[in-house]
Image: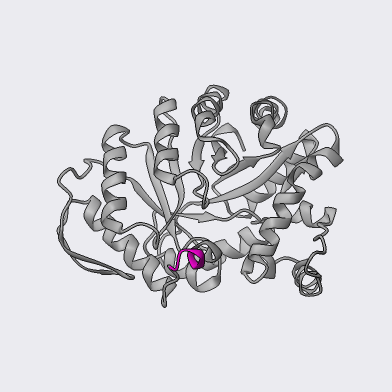
Amino acid sequence: MDMSDIGIVFGSLTPPEELTEGAALAERLGFGELWFSEDCFFTGGVSGLTQLLAATRSLPAGLGLASVMTRHPAVLAMELAGLARMYPGRTRAAVGLGNTHWLRQMGLMPERPLTAVVETVEVLRELLGGATVDRRAGTHRLADVRLEFPPRQPPELWVGAVNRRALRAAATVADGMLLSVLAGPTYVSWAREQVTAAGRPTPPITAFVLASVDDDERAARDAVREAVGFFLKAEAHTALVEQSRHGAEIRDRLAKLGKDEPFVVEDAWIDEFAVAGRPGHVRERLQELLTAGARSLGLWLFPPERLAGQLQRIARDVLPATG
């Protein structure tokens, strides 16, 4: 493991006006890639990705992820084509279904989610390759659509997936696979098995990681505790939790939770679903995720108000000793 294996995730916790400063610092410190996580209803993914690319000189930057339901693929292809022409070789985009709660808020849940994802990737690839497209992509229709300015070097198209069928199907069309936060070593290993079972060369896998480093182990865990709890509630029904040895306990706890009762996140759960602690512990946990099958990791750093300090500590105290 070295700096090139570790990227930084920006998104809902970073105000839009602070993105460029954080991205530039990440590049100066030597991190390997950047990602922008689009969460509703914070900062738009395309505008966020644009800021990351504009603030840096050479780092690859990805959108992770764009819901196939919230943007028509022709519009998303236009946006990606422009970025790929402006920043050739540096742009990538992950697409997927997206958070089902947010989709229901907007009345956008499809009847066949997996079909929508696969067909959207296919259409995006055709459009970005300069083809004229006349077909359906999920719930969207394209009638003789062709980009006027397709990129000379199309961006990589990644797919974000969680469960078995989605991982296997996505692996047949994706240039890379994006795994959600809460992806611990057990889940990463399992997900890689599903991707490999798709029967084609295994695409690279990047896993997003809730992370915090501090000389005070308790402070590091507390920095990510609320976020871990939020995502455990949101993902309790998925393989992210199901594949964990704590899965049954977490689901039982949530099922018995009263309406106004706080959801207590145990330290053992944090150790499974996040990377938080002293520099040596963080180093070991990151290596475990890479050994489990991730090609790279995208760190979502906490606490967000100390982003610069977290970036510097990871670069200075965690990664150099891994060279």
In the picture, the quarter occupied by the N terminus is: top right
Tell me, yes or no, whether the highlighted magenta stretch contains residue 105: yes
Q: Is residue 87 left or right of residue 26?
A: left
Q: Residue at x 81, y 57 (%)?
A: 265
Residue 198 in sight from this viewpoint: no
Residue 101 point in image, percent of width and height = 55, 65
Would you identify the image quadrant in which residue 223 lies? top right
Q: Main secondary structure of the magenta part?
A: helix
Circle count: 0
Q: Is residue 286 left or right of residue 14?
A: right
Residue 84 point in image, percent of width and height = 30, 39
Residue 253 point in image, percent of width and height = 81, 70
Q: Residue at x 55, y 31 (%)?
A: 31
Q: Which residues are magenta?
A: 103-107
In the picture, the quarter occupied by the C terminus is: top right
Along the line of sight, which residue is nearer the eye, 113 or 179? 113
